[in-house]
Image (cartoon, rainbow, N blue to C red):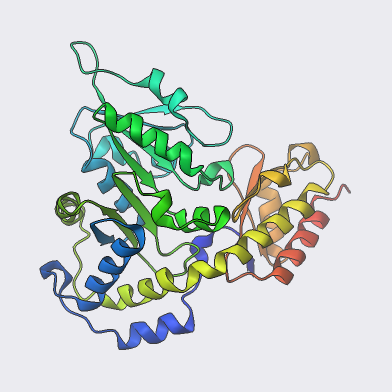
Amino acid sequence: MIDLRSDTVTKPTEAMRRAMASAEVGDDVYGEDPTMNLLEARAAQIFGKEAAVWTPTGSMANTIGLKVNTTHGDEIICEARAHIQDWEFSMAGWFCGCLLRTIETDDGILTWDRIEPKLRPDGPHCSPTTLVELENTHNMHGGTVYPVATIGRICDEAHDRGLKVHMDGARVFNAAAAIDVPVAEITAKVDTVSVCLSKGLGAPAGSLLLGRADTVAKARRMRKRLGGGMRQVGILAAAGLIALEDIPTLLPADHENARLIADRVSEIPGVSIDPAKVTTNIVIFDIAGTGANPAAVSQELKRRGVIINGIGGTRMRAVTHYDVNRADCEEACEILAEVLRPN
């Protein structure tokens, strides 16, 4: 199968498997797992943050990131198609007790000029805005990337007003590769940032939440409440270290393959996409003009050895990663063109 559903389908590399098999481990709830301690310390160093805590999933990392920056009854501003809004089981409300106030954008990129009018002051009639959430890259807008200056202004203005900023940086290494800057420069001013090790970076599981030492200490308590306290988890941290150190250099190839797919898909009659907007590893295209049904297209593609799914309406999404090479992407496009060809 040529699996382009998501970069979550990556398999651990052989180097990761070897590292997992020989990892030194201890009880992480007691803080005694040396491999996990090394991963968290190295992540903090790479991101320029005081501390990091590992979580089993990205949704948990984001939930904790929201929780440690807010109190029950607060409002959080995010983009209308943010992952925390659409794909995380309403944890902002269910666990954090917060309301998400969303802002519609054309590209998933919030600016301060759009945020400021949505701020709610504390008072007798409304709950205060206390947190701004940014998603970088933005999944449902096709992997779009925040300019560093835009992040900086949002953080400066938010901090001037006593607000915090959390970044859902599940694919922040893709953002860094796309604009050729270190992740530490992208996340320098945010209060907390989550990063996924098990998407394009290829680890079998795990995310990290980074921020100030006191914030991360509080986050560990939240992780325990959510059932994320684990024991000899160094076997996963060992893979995470390789994901963190070695795999980011492979991401530009994923981006090149995504641009190839975008170019080829744009040539299919009835398909709508602007290849110039594809800058990372996510390709979203609309098949409305073909008259085809996305579910039926997905089913036929899978029968022919390609997995690409619909993401709502007539839109479909292909995501590149290191387990699909250029030849795979070319073959997938040829098969997609055949499936969408009018009878």
**For this view, does 7 lie left or right of residue 4?**
left
Q: Which residue lies furthest to the right in this view?
A: 343
Residue at image x 54%, y 58%? 177
Residue 188 sits above or below residue 69 on the image: below
Q: In this view, does 35 lie to the left or right of 295?
A: left
Q: Where residue 217 appears, x then y in whole percent? A: 15, 54
Q: In this view, does 131 lie above or below 208?
A: above
Q: Quadrant of the N terminus?
A: bottom right
**Could you say which quadrant of the image residue 5 lies in?**
bottom right
Q: Residue at x 37, y 45 (%)?
A: 167
Where residue 211 sits in the image (x, y, percent)?
A: 26, 51
Residue at 49% across, 36% down: 81
Whether residue 130 is visible, yes or no, is no
**Front-lying residue, 178 or 255:** 178
**Between 233 and 297, which is closer to the camera in this rendering?**
233
Does residue 155 appear anywhere in the picture? yes
